[in-house]
């Protein structure tokens, strides 16, 4: 039986970055992954969707060209080429990660992990159609799988998950997106921009319920304005086939006929391989971990979606790097000095049109935690760079609380929000006060000046706010 110092089960962003970091530390490891390195994110999630987002942005920009004084008469969308480019982007990035593994000589065991056991002080992982392997340390990074609704099963032909919809090589005439969370809103925005008739159905009273309420309401307004038919407070009781169409029976008693259905009602942790490992504590269907990413079993770590924390690729990556560092500290008998990861201060992004970026607490959360809070806001309609670029939808909102008026939340809806929120992440994670933040000089003309003016608005001193 081949033995490794560390075994990593799962080669997604958390798993593969943990492997590279362990290798950088000079520690031996191997990754168990039945598919290609990169996991859902690189192969079937974050990266391919962003390739589609970019195509949809260009298509939208071309339609707006006359308002910029440009005579653009391109009116044919070749989705086959859009689809092919998406695959090319994925292939280039995944091949790059595979090259890193080959260069560093990190073994990738191409098999499915079946069971995890402890034998004589070691972890033993049995593999499907391969010899078992053992490790002194194990990192579980098995990710998550799409949820289904009672009576509605994903078949990836008519009823699609986020994986299945990325494999469509032609645009459907109509699409019902069931679930108005991040994934549902992103795909609704992408396909609507390509001219597909999109229906967005959400059981809760509003979309993206995890976001600041004011931002969520504004996003819903913009999506409706783009032509997406949004129905909130509505569930789906069932889906049936009627010729070429799918008929959705809704909880309000109405029916809807579409060509395809995207089921995007969340994801659940995937760790069926360790169900026989009775000693591992779970909570709400996820593996419990401490600040070191350790489960209650010594030397057994868990990272990423399987932990039930913030289901984002960069969350998994950060958890993986911390797990790798804790393993190094154990091997070297050194103290682990990094501060605990504050999950609410991890930036969150939604790649809709317009984009959403957020970090820290929402206004409601901040009020519940601190009592009185101060809010600063600034609209992109008064930002020079946004006006010049022709994209003025949205605003920046900052939240400060406590005696020192420390920044505890930033929420952006508008152009390049996913890039701009990094500035909020830095300020919030460093516990910068509103006063100290106002000492920062922002370049002109930039979109980031909207952040500066929102910070100034905390004191009622924004120059350009009406």
Image (cartoon, rainbow, N blue to C red):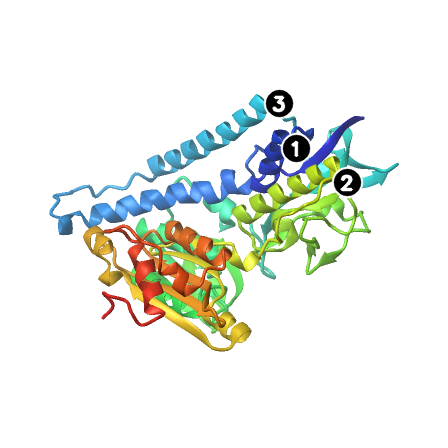
* Residue at the far right in the pictured view: 120
Chain-order first, disc 2 or disc 3 = 3
Where, by quadrant of the figure, is residue 100 drawn? Answer: top right
Residue bearing mark 3: 105
**Apparent side of residue 299 relative to residue 453 in the rendered image (left or right):** right
Q: Which mark is residue 115?
A: 2
Classify 10 Å Cα crowding around label 1: few (below 14), some (14-19), many (20 and above): many
Q: Name the spot of residue 36 as percent of width and height, x first.
A: 57, 32
Q: Marks 1 and 3: CB-CB under 8 Å?
A: no
Q: Is 12 situated above or below 212?
A: above
Q: Going from the N terminus, do you reach mark 2 or mark 1 first? A: 1
416 to 284, vertically: above or below: above
Q: In x, y percent, where is residue 10?
A: 64, 39
- Left or right, 294 with respect to 41, comes to right
C-alpha span from label 2 to label 1: 15 Å
Q: Secondary structure at mark 2?
A: strand
Between 13 and 56, the one lying in front of the other is 13
Image vertical order of residue 419 relative to residue 403, above or below: above
Left or right: residue 74 versus residue 113 is left
Q: How far apart are labels 2 and 3 at the CA level? A: 26 Å
Q: Secondary structure at mark 1?
A: strand
Q: Earlier in the sequence, mark 1 or mark 3?
A: 1
**Label 2–label 1 contact, CB within 8 A:** no
Q: Nearer the viewer, mark 2 or mark 1?
A: 1
Q: Which residue is mark 1?
A: 31
For image coordinates 47% across by 77% down, the residue present is 372
- Relative depth, front residue between 219 and 463: 463
Q: CA distance from mark 1 to mark 3?
A: 11 Å
Q: Quadrant of residue 124?
A: top right
Give the percent coordinates (x, y) of residue 74. Answer: 19, 41
Q: Residue at x 46, y 56 (%)?
A: 182
């Amino acid at each position: 039986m081949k033995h490794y110092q560390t075994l990593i089960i799962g080669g997604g962003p958390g798993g593969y970055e943990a492997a590279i970091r362990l290798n950088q530390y000079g520690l031996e490891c191997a990754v168990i992954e039945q598919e290609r390195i990169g996991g859902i994110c690189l192969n079937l999630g974050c990266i391919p969707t962003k390739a589609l987002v970019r195509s949809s942005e260009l298509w939208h920009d071309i339609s707006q060209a006359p308002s910029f004084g440009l005579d653009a008469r391109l009116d044919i969308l070749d989705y086959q080429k859009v689809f092919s480019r998406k695959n090319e982007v994925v292939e280039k990035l995944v091949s790059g990660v595979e090259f890193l593994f080959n260069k560093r000589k990190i073994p990738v065991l191409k098999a499915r992990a079946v069971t995890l056991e402890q034998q004589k002080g070691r972890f033993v992982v049995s593999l499907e159609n391969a010899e078992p392997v053992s490790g002194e340390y194990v990192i579980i990074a098995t990710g998550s799988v799409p949820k289904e609704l009672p009576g509605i099963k994903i078949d990836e032909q008519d009823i699609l998950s986020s994986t299945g919809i990325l494999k469509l090589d032609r645009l459907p005439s109509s699409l019902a997106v069931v679930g108005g969370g991040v994934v549902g809103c992103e795909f609704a925005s992408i396909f609507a921009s390509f001219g597909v008739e999109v229906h967005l159905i959400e059981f809760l009273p509003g979309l993206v319920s995890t976001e600041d309420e004011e931002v969520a309401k504004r996003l819903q307004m913009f999506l409706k304005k783009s032509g997406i038919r949004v129905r909130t407070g509505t569930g789906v009781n069932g889906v049936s086939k009627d010729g070429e169409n799918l008929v959705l029976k809704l909880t309000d008693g109405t029916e809807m006929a579409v060509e395809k259905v995207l089921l995007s009602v969340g994801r659940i942790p995937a760790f069926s391989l360790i169900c026989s490992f009775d000693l591992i504590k779970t909570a709400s269907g996820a593996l419990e971990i401490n600040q070191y990413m350790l489960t209650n079993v010594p030397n057994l770590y868990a990272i990423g979606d399987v932990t039930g924390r913030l289901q984002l690729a960069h969350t998994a990556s950060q958890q993986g790097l911390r797990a790798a560092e804790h393993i190094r500290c154990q091997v070297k008998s050194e103290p682990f000095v990094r501060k605990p990861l504050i999950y609410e201060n991890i930036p969150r992004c939604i790649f809709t049109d317009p984009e959403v970026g957020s970090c820290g607490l929402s206004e409601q959360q901040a009020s519940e935690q601190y009592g009185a809070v101060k809010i600063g806001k600034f609209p992109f309609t008064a930002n020079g760079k946004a006006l010049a670029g022709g994209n003025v939808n949205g605003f920046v909102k900052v939240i400060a609380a406590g005696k020192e008026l420390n920044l505890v939340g930033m929420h952006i809806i508008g152009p390049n929000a996913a890039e701009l929120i990094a500035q909020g992440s830095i300020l919030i994670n460093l516990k910068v006060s509103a006063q100290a933040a106002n000492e920062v000089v922002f370049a002109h003309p930039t979109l980031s000046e909207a952040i500066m003016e929102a910070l100034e608005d905390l004191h009622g001193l924004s120059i350009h706010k009406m």
